[in-house]
């Protein structure tokens, strides 16, 4: 491949990438055979403000590159332009007999950063609505528990495991366990441990083991 063919290929690729990803994507072809890496062609140059012939890099500096940088690909690196734009930058070399060209791709994602901030603000909330509605709602939970206990018709001290399981099932049907701190409340009222309440709930779904009466 001659230098002209290599440039034609990279230039065509640069133009196609710029068209595909739109005005936020700057693409260019550098002459890396020159330590000042002048720009041979550029698309969407408004991102960096550069034009053909410029030796400025995306960082806004005009420094000659060392020998390693002149032949090394840089992929998906972060950069900030002098105007504060946030850029993802990649450089791919095409080296042949008598030439060293490189395709540069600089994607300006500054607007996405702002959009993300807006999305975060939109999705943020002060607290869970359910918790806020039922904060300090022991009285409501107590009323539901008393209702379920009355169905069994026994005092707590006389309950068997079957009775407790029935109460747990009734409480679950009434969404009592969606209340804040419902498990410790129910455990206290049933005079059992929290572990037992969780175990009863597991048994209701077939995931627990049988406990002695």
Image (cartoon, grey):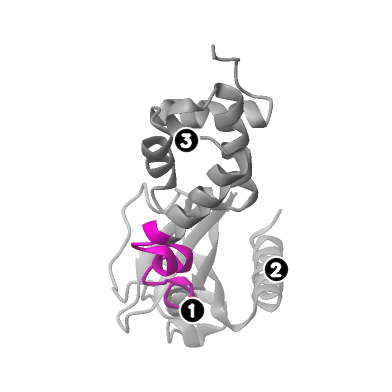
The magenta region covers 119-139
> 141 or 105, which is in the foreground?
141
User: Residue 175, position in %: x, y?
Assistant: 58, 53
Residue at 51 percent of width and 84 percent of height: 45
Is residue 5 shown left or right of residue 211?
Answer: right
First-in-chain label (2 vs 3): 2
User: Residue 143, position in %: x, y?
Assistant: 47, 56
Is residue 198 depicted above or below 73 in this figure?
A: above
Q: CA distance from mark 2 to mark 3?
A: 90 Å
Q: CA distance from mark 1 to mark 3?
A: 59 Å
Q: Which mark is residue 155?
A: 3
> 77 or 93, which is in the foreground?
77
Residue at 61 percent of width and 25 percent of height: 162
**Mark 2 or 3, which is nearer the eye?**
3
- Which secondary structure, mark 2? helix
**Mark 1 or 3, which is nearer the eye?**
3
Q: Residues within 10 Å of mark 1 (few under 14, many from 20)?
A: few
Q: Which residue is mark 1?
A: 115
> 104 or 168, which is in the foreground?
168
Is residue 187 shown left or right of residue 7?
Answer: left
Q: CA distance from mark 1 to mark 2?
A: 37 Å
Q: Residue 98: tell me if it is visible.
A: no
First-in-chain label (1 vs 2): 2
User: Residue 105, position in %: x, y?
Assistant: 54, 67
Q: Which mark is residue 213?
A: none
- Which secondary structure, mark 1? helix
- Which secondary structure, mark 3? loop
Q: Which residue is mark 2?
A: 8
User: Residue 89, position in %: x, y?
Assistant: 46, 63
Q: Residue 213: tell me if it is visible.
A: yes
- Magenta stretch: residue 126 in it? yes
First-in-chain label (1 vs 3): 1
């Amino acid at each position: 491949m001659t230098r002209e063919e290599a440039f034609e290929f990279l230039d065509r690729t640069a133009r196609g990438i710029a068209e595909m990803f739109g005005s936020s994507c700057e693409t260019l072809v550098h002459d890396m055979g020159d330590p000042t890496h002048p720009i041979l062609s550029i698309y969407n140059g408004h991102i960096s403000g550069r034009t053909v012939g410029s030796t400025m890099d995306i960082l806004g500096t005009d420094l000659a590159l060392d020998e390693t940088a002149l032949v090394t690909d840089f992929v998906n690196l972060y950069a900030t332009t002098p105007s504060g734009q946030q850029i993802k930058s990649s450089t791919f070399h095409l080296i042949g007999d008598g030439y060293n060209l490189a395709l540069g791709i600089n994607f300006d994602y500054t607007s996405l950063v702002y959009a993300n901030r807006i999305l975060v603000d939109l999705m943020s909330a002060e607290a869970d609505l359910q918790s806020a509605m039922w904060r300090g709602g022991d009285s409501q939970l107590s009323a539901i528990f008393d209702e379920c206990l009355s169905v069994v018709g026994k005092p707590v001290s006389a309950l068997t495991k079957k009775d407790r399981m029935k109460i747990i099932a009734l409480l679950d049907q009434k969404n009592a366990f969606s209340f804040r701190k419902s498990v410790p409340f129910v455990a206290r009222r049933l005079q059992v441990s929290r572990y037992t309440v969780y175990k009863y709930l597991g048994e209701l779904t077939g995931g627990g083991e049988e406990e002695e009466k």
